[in-house]
Image (tube, rainbow, N blue to C red):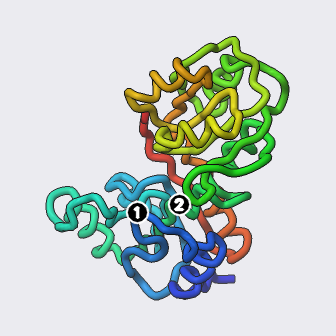
Amino acid sequence: MANEGIAREELGSWLDAMLEAARFRDYCPNGLQVEGRARVRRVVCGVTASLALIDAAVARGADALLVHHGWFWKSEDGRVTGFRRERMARVLASGINLFAYHLPLDAHPSIGNNAQLARRLGWGVDGRFAEQDIGFFGAPAAPGTVGEVARDLARVLGREPLLVGDSARTVRRIAWCSGGAQDYFEAALATGADVFVSGEVSEQTVHLARETGMAFIAAGHHATERYGIEALGAEVQARLGIPSEFVDIDNPV
């Protein structure tokens, strides 16, 4: 049977409802960011709507590109020039619909970035913290040390994380928030965690870890946010019957 696809509006409504997009105050618009062709028969997913990912979606004949990091961030220049023009031109010329979900994809309790990271590491979820409850905290899969948590992250994510603090400290509680969440250090500390895992690190994070005793692990922004968008694409395929492919554009960050 031919793949009849789904109407663009129906896909957008389903995604908005699945991720409860309307309840989030975010730094960018969530949902449909660039309107393309009316029906969607194939979806490509990836972390960031870069030119490389757009080209990959075009090459695969995608009708929609579904990402975690989209466009139109509040803090950036809104003019469509330079690399922004190149990205926009490629999307418009191809007729691809661009859908992006930022904080809603961090926070989702089962397919979100933090939930998926926990699933792969075997961490139990006991509660939430930070802005709009996007951070998670809970217990490790088995008793161990901060150094062992770092080694598990390296094995699962395929990259060596940066560890700040006492690698021999026993871990009874972990706090984690994917991406650039290092500014939530104090909120993580308030959970009683022995270690806080995020994607990025700032200069002041090192001093905070040394002075408070809570270890910090920077495991990579891209590396910690691959799995939510991949899981969302799998849900699109399983529930809506639309072929979906995750494309991982290499990024060392």
Residue at 32% in and 66% down: 72
Please tell me whether residue 81 is drawn above or below residue 1 in the rendered image: above
Please tell me whether residue 74 is drawn above or below residue 118 in the rendered image: below
Task: Please state which amino acid type lies under the numbered disc 2.
Answer: Leu
Residue at 21% in and 56% down: 83
Q: Which quadrant would the C terminus be assigned to in this image?
A: top left
Disc 1 marks which residue?
Answer: 27
- Which residue is nearer to you in this view: 240 or 3? 240
Give left or right: position of 204 versus 133: left
- What percent of the width, then of the height, locates residue 164? 53, 20
Task: Please state which amino acid type lies under the numbered disc 1.
Answer: Tyr
Which tag, 2 or 1, sits closer to the chain's start? 1
Residue at 48% in and 74% down: 31
- What percent of the width, then of the height, locates residue 89? 24, 69
Disc 2 marks which residue?
Answer: 103
Q: Secondary structure at mark 1?
A: loop
Q: Is residue 221 visible?
A: no
Q: Say which mark, if any, is on residue 68.
A: none
